[in-house]
Image (spheres, rainbow, N blue to C red):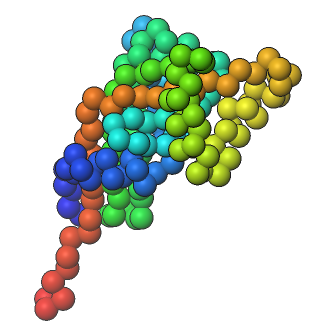
Amino acid sequence: MLINEMSEKECHAALARNAMGRLGCSLESQPYVVPIYFAYDSNYIYSFSTLGKKIEWMRANPKVCVQVDEIESQNRWLSVIANGRYEELPEPLYEAERAHARSLLAKQHHWWLNALAERRITMSDELIAPLFFRIFIHSVSGLSAVSEKVDSAG
């Protein structure tokens, strides 16, 4: 297996192809990683949530990362990490950005389901406030693996 560094262009292309990844944040030297649905556009990753641990932690420390994988087999995969800054999109100040995030996320099936379903177990609908956010990407890095070619001539 050959493992290669991905170019910045290849990393951004992988982010654009994927709709699910893992969000990493930290507070007081404690890391926290959770799966998220997202939409990528230019240098931003857009997502949706409700108030909870990850939002509280990102408000306190906006340095975050998002990691995506594409795994075909043990010998053929790629992994990309986007490092960036959490930016909340509250109403009415970010109305245009929220509409943009909603339009991007609406292209994905049930992008809102996890955040709302989790809260509906313990709260009524009127207590659930939708929260849109984006991550401004500062840097990306990635690795890809491909199988080594086997010489069939022996």
| Residue 97 can be seen, yes or no | yes
* 94 is higher (above) or lower (below) than 148: above
Q: Which residue lies furthest to the bottom in this view?
A: 153
Residue at 26% over, 33% down? 139
Eyeballing the image, is 104 above or below 120?
below
Residue 35 in view in this figure: no
Of residues 88 and 50, the one drawn nearer to the viewer in this rendering: 88
| Count of number-bearing discs | 0
Quarter where residue 26 is shown: top left
Q: Which quarter of the rendered picture does the N terminus lie within? A: bottom left
Task: Tell me: 7 left or right of 86.
Answer: left
Residue plotted at (33% across, 64% down): 76
Residue at the far right: name it: 124
Q: Which residue is drawn at 46% across and 8% down?
A: 60
Quadrant for the C terminus in the image: bottom left
Residue at x-position 68% and y-position 47%: 110
Residue 121 appears left or right of 4: right
Q: Relative to 118, does residue 149 appear above or below in the rendering? A: below
Relative to the observer, which residue lies in front, 23 or 19?
19
Q: Residue 92 at what x, y percent from top left?
A: 59, 17
Residue 69, position as x, y percentages in the image: 41, 50
Residue 21 screen position, x and y as percent: 48, 42
Q: Is 7 left, or right, of 82 in this rendering?
A: left
Q: In this view, does 28 lie above or below 15?
A: above
The quadrant in which residue 4 appears is bottom left
